[in-house]
Amino acid sequence: MRLLLLLGAALSLAALLAALVSLVWTPYDITAMAIAERLQPPSPAHWLGTDHFGRDIGAMLMAGARTSIAVALVAVGIGMGAGVPLGLLAAASRGSLIDEAVMRLNDLVFAFPSLVIAILITAVFGPSALNAILAIGIFNIPVFARVTRGAALSLWTLDFIRAAEVAGKGPARISFEHILPNVANLLIVQGTIQFSLGILAEAGLSYVGLGAQPPTASWGRMLAEAQTMVTLAPHVAIFPGLAIVLTVLGLNLLGDGLRDHLDPRLRRIR
Amino acid sequence: MTLLSVRGLSLSIDATPILTGVSFDIAPGETFGLVGESGSGKSMTALGVMGLLPRGAVASGEVRFAGENLLSLPERRLTELRGNEIGMIFQEPMTALNPMQTIGDQVAETLLIHRAATRSEARAAARDRLARVGLPGERFPLSLYPHELSGGQRQRVAIAMAIALRPKLLIADEPTTALDVTTQAQILDLLKRLTAEESMALMLITHDLAVVAGMATHVAVMQRGRIVEDGATRTVFRTRAHDYTRKLFAASGHRPARVARPRPETLLEVEEAVREYVLPRPSAFAPHPRLRAVDGVSLTIRRGESLGLVGESGCGKSTLTRAILGLDPIQSGRVRLGGAEVTAGRTMPRALRARMQVVFQDPYGSFNPRHRVGLLVAEPFHLTGTPKDASDRIAAALEEVGLKASDMTKYIHEFSGGQRQRIAIARALIIRPDLIVLDEAVSALDVRVRAQVLDLLARLQQSHGLAYLFVSHDLSVVRAVTDRVLVMRSGRIVEEGGTEAVFTRPSHPYTRQLVAATPVIPANW
């Protein structure tokens, strides 16, 4: 299990590193076309080959990692930023109308197929990375709200919360001082998993042309552009596909591993 | 002739020795008591006998049951024995049953697994077994689910499951610890009757010497994985040859030296307090039924006084306690502390709140595991404002309860249950309140640790002039540390008076029932 956690961490770190390095350096300029060199298979000059415009696929993947990670990160940020306080609020006012309202609103968001709504949002407001972020982020809110509320509810029954009440602390203070640190583990794990789903969602939106627009590189759009050429030059589709699969796999392994690692009850079970 | 013969049973988990050379015999039909404090290896001995050891456990020695050495039997033969020849019941009746299955199915299941009985035969047998444990068919149909039963009734179902196949040996691991005294008395009676009528041997594991005194013919005292003393119960209880046995006895009957010094002025006054809960409608158009958890309770506590509040679970003790602490509103009546009205929530002034503190039962749930002890103990400063010498005050409070000032940088998981209760007392003490509510504060502790904590409470009461409201279901503890006592039942106070007077000459039938149900070691032993 430890091995899988390390593998997950390594894969996630590789994606992050690629994104960070691409900010200052990529092996080739991804905006420069070289039609003469198009659709070349992997070679010493172009390790991962070139696409139909003759751009280096390695460089495109690095720049694409930046887009994917940025979109997923902000989306998870929106989800946590709004979802966690909502979950804490619902748990603090458990059983009341506020709790009911928050949770039913969550159900409402949950009831819509997320990708379809994301497509709707980007279709109405125009395709862009920003709209993709918003669309993915909104669907992260109920996930975090539910996880937070569920964990917080059981904490509210414990005596140390009673002791804090006896010490005159109000629900808001108790939520942030006592509840939040004790649900943080869960949130980290859920965050990693939502992060990987965010990357998938961004790739999906870009694939249908509603995500990041050219010339911003995106794994999803690379796949979309490659699909007509799969039989001619399979590497053009394989490498972005691999990048998505490995990054998502890495993040999921990391999330699972972290959960086992952070939860002392699971630590002994092998 | 012996039924179970354990010889030199040693056990270690990950190279840590848990049991060392445990030996004892149980004759057919005999009741054998195994007593000791938590962590002494009692339960591990039982699991060793059942072959249910945790992973990584290495056992040596011999466990002979009806001639076969259980330690060398293959798992298949062991599963045949379990349930069939050896039954087991556990402490927690709430989790011992599957909430998704009816009680009939659960009892019948044991029969179906072990015998090729048909479904209808198994159900008929289950009916019969449930009737044997005091759950007759007309009131307790097989189709009931565990949540429809009380704790004592669930424990009866667990016993019915364990004895479904008429095993020769029943292992009962703290079977009544989670139950109220009157329920405990009923379950112990039931076990006594079953062992006599079915000539079944019983291995009774408990921390309660008085329970063993009333049940077992033969007893072994365990400490740190060894049996330090064993023999006929009466002899062991009389001679107390081993030092540890003596200490256990001293601790379980321990009464802290205290002089009642209540001053005349009233500190807390509860007048006709009523707290009602609205329950869900039983059917779509029926009115909401109401439950009066606290039904017109009045009480007073004087400064420096110890008041006991006893009653069984569900009698309204906790609701009343929450109202007194200003955590829950009451619907009518009033609670006054030092003349000022206690109200629930934000409206209650901090200075008033600062005059009361509380210590809870569960030493494990009482602290935020992510905070250091210093921060935990300092929490009540929220009421008074953190003083300049806060860290000196924290150090002093820790030292007062017998811990070290350096403990404030540690996390709570580094402390034992008894130490945690001391930290809880330090937390209550730090803002120097007038009243401390002790909500089952020593119930979860072992007898010797309990004796120490009671001593500490008595000492602090003398030195700080504290008043205690001692809420407990344990009559012997309340008797040892309080001046006056209130007996609560179904939301009402049914009897009130000086502690000794109430316990020696109870006037209300319910109090008499409580006192009679409390197990005691016979005085002439």
Image (cartoon, coloured by chain):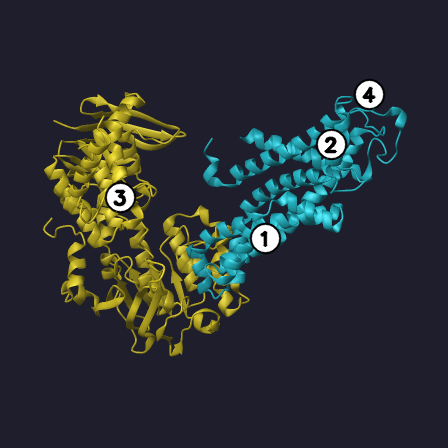
Chain colours: A cyan, B yellow
In the displayed structure, B21 sits above or below B451; it is: above
- Amino acid, disc 1: Gly
The residue under label 3 is B143
Closest to the observer, B255 or A217: A217
Observer able to see residue B461: no
In the displayed structure, A264 sits above or below B382; it is: above
On residue A223, which mark appears? Answer: 2
Are the residues flagged by discs 4 and 1 from a single subunit? yes
Subunit ID for the residue under disc 2: A
Q: CA distance from mark 1 to mark 3?
A: 42 Å
Q: Nearer the viewer, mark 2 or mark 4?
A: 2
Q: CA distance from mark 2 to mark 4?
A: 23 Å
Q: Earlier in the sequence, mark 1 or mark 2?
A: 1
The residue under label 4 is A44
Quarter of the view holding residue A4: top right
The residue under label 1 is A83
Closest to the observer, A146 or B143: B143
Q: Nearer the viewer, mark 4 or mark 3?
A: 3
Subunit ID for the residue under disc 4: A
- Amino acid, disc 3: Ser
Look at the numbered discs 4 and 1 and tell me whether their residues touch, using CB distance below 8 Å. Answer: no
